Every structure is written in C-alpha cells, then in structure tokens.
Image (cartoon, rainbow, N blue to C red):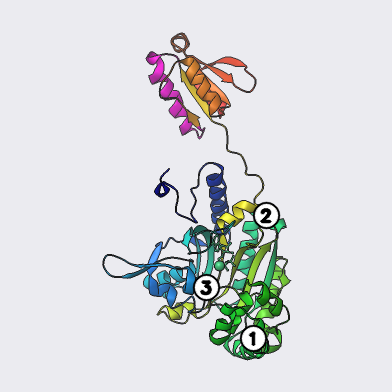
C-alpha cells in the first residue's frame, strides 16, 4: 500500500474498542468535572504561535523541540496546540472574562507534539483539562487535584496510580533554590548530559525533569526546595496539604517534581503509575499565577491539570459493555413500511435497534447475529394481518407472538 495511505507517524485512528475507551474517558471526566462545578469550553486547535512561545518557556522541551509550527497562507505564524492551558488563558482574555472570576473550565481535545513515538507517546494525542482561573486560594489547588482523583476513581484506575505533590515556591524561593541547584550541578558538570549543560545555563530547574539516565543519578542527590522556601510559600504549601486532607485525597510528597512547562509556581503534582513503563505520568498539573498576565491580561492566579486520554484508556481494565441492539427483520417488501415503524418506535424509546437495508429472512437473521443482537423482531405478512410480530430472543431461541403495540414495552 502506498505510504501516504498510512496514518502519519505518531498518530492513530480511533475505531471500535479504542474509540469506545476514548469516549468513556472523556464522558466520565466531563461528568465528574460537571459535579465539581466546571463548565466546558472549546478553544481552537491552532493558535497564534506567540500564545505558546511566550508562555510555555523558551527552554521547555515543548517549545524548543516539539511544536508543530508553520506559517499559514496569509503569512501568520500558527502552532497546533501542544497543551490546553495557554489557549484557555488566551480565551479568558479575548472574551473579557477576566472581569468575572473565578472561572472553572473543563476541556477535552487533541494536542500535538513532535515527539519520538512510542507506547503512550504520540504526535497527536488527546487530553482532558481542568482549570480554575482567578483565585490564589490553596483550596482551589486541592479542589482541582480532588477532581482529578475523582475522575481516576470513576474510571477505576485510582488503584493503579499514586498522587505525588511538590511545591515550586514563589519567585523568591525559586531564585534561592536556583542558586543552590547551580552550585550543585556545576560541581558535577562533567557528568551532566549535553541537554542539561544547556539547561544549567538557561534554566537549571529544568534539569530535574531530565529523563537522561546519568542526569537522573545526579538528580537523586540534588538539593531540594524545602529549605529555600519563604515563610509565605511554606504556608501556602501547608495549606494545600490541609485542604487535600479535608477532601480526603491521599498523596505522597516528592521534591523532584518540577513539571515540563515553565509557567508553574507553588503547587506541582502528578498522578503516576508503574503500569505504563517510561510513560508513567497519566495526569499532571499545578499553579500558574503569571500566565494570564503573560498573555496580556491582568494578574490572574490560576491552577489546573491535564491528563493524557490514551494513557488513561490503556490503564482501564474493563469497559462497561454497550447494550446489545435489537434487529428488526421484515419478511418481504410488503411489510417493510410497518417494520420501519417498529424500528423507529424502538429507537424513540431509547432502544438501540437496526434493520438491514435489504435481503431475505436468512440473510437478515445472519446479520442480526453478526451485530450481536439480543432479539429479533420478525414481521411477516400473516403476522401483520393479525397485528402481531414474532419476538425472538436470540440467546435462548425462544420466540413469541407479541401484539405490535406491545413490542417496544417488551424489549425496553
Ligand atoms: P511526559 O513527561 O510523559 O513527556 P509531559 O510532562 O510532557 O509528559 P504534560 O505536558 O504535563 O506532559 O501533559 C499532561 C499529560 O498529557 C501527561 O501526563 C500525559 O498523560 C499526556 N501526554 C503528554 N505528552 C503526550 C504524548 N506525546 N502522547 C500521549 N500523551 C501525552
Ligand atoms: Mg513531554
């Protein structure tokens, strides 16, 4: 087959079981986020490149290596969104919503990153997103996390994941921590990867997020931020933990969590699993108080999370199975009109029902079996004359004549 008929590298089609899992994740997340008071938004899949380049951090992997950026036919710089938060902040400002805060936003959709494809890592993948914009209250950090945890529970994967939290402090704490890190990593320059040598110059915190083996060994003994926190930053972190306890969310502190994007401060967290190999983070997020202002809006503190739908779908065990359909089987063209009436009344009553477009009884019964129908409603000319249809339960083979007006009630 010609290679142009394959999906592009790092993308996948969602069909059958894959699509059902995907839909289940999105619908579950949407329902839970609704219970937590979040409202769904949809922002464009592409944005002006500056929406991301300004905000995600010049040294983040996403901006330096992973963005799908191009100039469109009108000469405008465009990027396929690599994450949702920056676009949501842009939308908050564009729509004048910085006047009505807080806003609690849920979103789901495709994201694009030019990465090396592997299990759980794609070039087009999908995320669910939960954000609270316009509050500096640590209770919001905890509520976002609690909502994420509730989504994992509703999907039945909470037992597979552990919540790890950390603080990145305020600007002053981070500056102090940064010099401590520079001191430590400068001592161990020789053992750092080339990428991390570059990070040491431009953004040393970013080294903590390195996936390089050698770097990871150094990182294990690197200084942690706790000793560098200002009183305010320490108090904020303590309050987040108090609120997590109030929400009943179990967590583990992990001082190595820094997150991949530059806009985070204070809270940083990840739900991790050991079940997906190297791609162990299923959900992550944190506080990003400076982002809306970067986007040209007023100072607007905010906190949020994102989860990879593919990774969640892989973790999920069993999907609640879809209700088996009912097949309507007319015998001969003369009764097709009456059969369609039964078909439509089943559908109106919320029963999944199908009727093959053509074919004799045998062909149509074969099709009923192929689609896994639980029952067939067989209608012949004699049945119609008597005002009945034959309802055949396919699992047992039991067949009974049912007055046409009672067929829906019998199968609902
Ligand atoms: P990783 O460390 O795995 O690269 P990340 O820190 O880049 O993840 P985020 O930007 O925080 O990821 O995105 C949130 C979530 O989106 C991740 O926890 C993961 O579940 C999912 N995700 C990120 N990148 C990809 C990808 N390329 N393919 C599939 N899912 C992804
Ligand atoms: Mg990444």
Cβ atoms at labels 1 and 3 below 8 Å apart = no
Residue 9 x/y as whole percent: 48, 55
Q: Residue furthest left?
A: 74
The residue at which mark 1 appears reads as 189
| Residue 125 is a magenta residue | no
Of circles 1 and 3, the one toward us is 1
Q: Is residue 14 above or below residue 113?
A: above
SS assignment for the magenta stretch, majority: helix
* Precedes in sequence: disc 1 or disc 3: 3
The quadrant in which residue 88 appears is: bottom left
Q: Residue at x 52, y 76 (%)?
A: 60
Q: Residues within 10 Å of mark 2 (few under 14, many from 20)?
A: some
The residue at which mark 3 appears reads as 61
Q: Residue at x 69, y 66 (%)?
A: 163
Residue 248 x/y as whole percent: 72, 65
Residue 115 at least partly seen: yes
**Which range of residues does the magenta coloring cover?**
331-352
Q: Within 8 Å of ligand 2, the CB of disc 3?
A: yes
Q: Secondary structure at mark 3?
A: helix
Residue 265 at least partly seen: no
Q: Secondary structure at mark 2?
A: loop
Q: Is residue 392 above or below residue 47?
A: above
Residue 216 x/y as whole percent: 68, 75
Q: Residues within 10 Å of mark 3 (few under 14, many from 20)?
A: some
In front of the other: 77 or 304: 77
C-alpha gap between disc 2 and disc 3: 28 Å
The residue at which mark 2 appears reads as 157
* Precedes in sequence: disc 2 or disc 1: 2
C-alpha gap between disc 1 and disc 3: 21 Å
Residue 396 x/y as whole percent: 65, 20
C-alpha gap between disc 2 and disc 1: 40 Å
């Amino acid at each position: 087959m010609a290679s142009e008929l394959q999906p592009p590298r790092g993308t996948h089609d969602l069909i059958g079981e894959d699509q059902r899992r995907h839909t289940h994740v999105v619908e579950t997340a949407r329902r839970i986020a609704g219970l937590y008071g979040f409202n769904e938004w949809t922002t464009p899949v592409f944005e002006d490149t500056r929406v991301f380049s300004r905000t995600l951090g010049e040294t983040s992997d996403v901006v330096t290596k992973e963005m799908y950026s191009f100039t469109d036919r009108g000469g405008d710089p465009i990027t396929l969104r690599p994450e949702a938060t920056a676009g949501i902040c842009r939308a908050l400002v564009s729509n004048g919503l910085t006047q009505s805060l807080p806003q609690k936003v849920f979103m789901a959709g495709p994201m694009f990153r030019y990465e090396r494809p592997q299990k759980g890592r794609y070039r087009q993948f999908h995320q669910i997103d939960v954000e609270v914009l316009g509050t500096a209250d640590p209770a919001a950090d905890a509520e976002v996390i609690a909502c994420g945890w509730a989504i994992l529970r509703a999907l039945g994967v909470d037992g597979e994941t552990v919540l790890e939290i950390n603080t990145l402090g305020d600007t002053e704490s981070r500056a102090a921590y940064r010099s401590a890190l520079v001191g430590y990593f400068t001592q161990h320059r020789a053992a750092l990867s080339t990428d991390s040598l570059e990070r040491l110059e431009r953004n040393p915190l970013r080294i903590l997020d390195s996936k390089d083996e050698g770097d990871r060994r150094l990182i294990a003994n690197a200084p942690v931020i706790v000793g560098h926190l200002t009183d305010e930053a320490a108090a904020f972190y303590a309050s987040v933990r108090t609120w997590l306890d109030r929400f009943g969310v179990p967590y583990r502190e992990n001082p190595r969590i820094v997150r991949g994007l530059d806009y985070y401060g204070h809270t940083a967290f990840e739900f991790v699993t050991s079940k997906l190999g190297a791609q162990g983070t299923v959900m992550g997020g944190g506080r990003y108080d400076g982002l809306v202002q970067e986007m040209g809006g007023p100072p607007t503190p905010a906190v949020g999370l994102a989860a990879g739908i593919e990774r969640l779908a892989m973790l999920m065990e069993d999907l609640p199975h879809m209700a088996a359909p009912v097949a309507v089987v007319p015998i001969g063209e003369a009764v097709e009109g009456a059969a369609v009436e039964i078909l439509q009344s089943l559908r109106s009553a919320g029963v999944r029902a199908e009727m093959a477009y053509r074919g004799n009884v045998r062909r149509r019964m074969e099709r009923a079996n192929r689609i896994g129908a639980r029952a067939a409603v067989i209608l012949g000319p004699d049945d119609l004359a008597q005002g009945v249809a034959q309802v055949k339960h396919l699992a047992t083979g039991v067949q009974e004549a049912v007055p046409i007006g009672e067929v829906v009630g019998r199968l609902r």
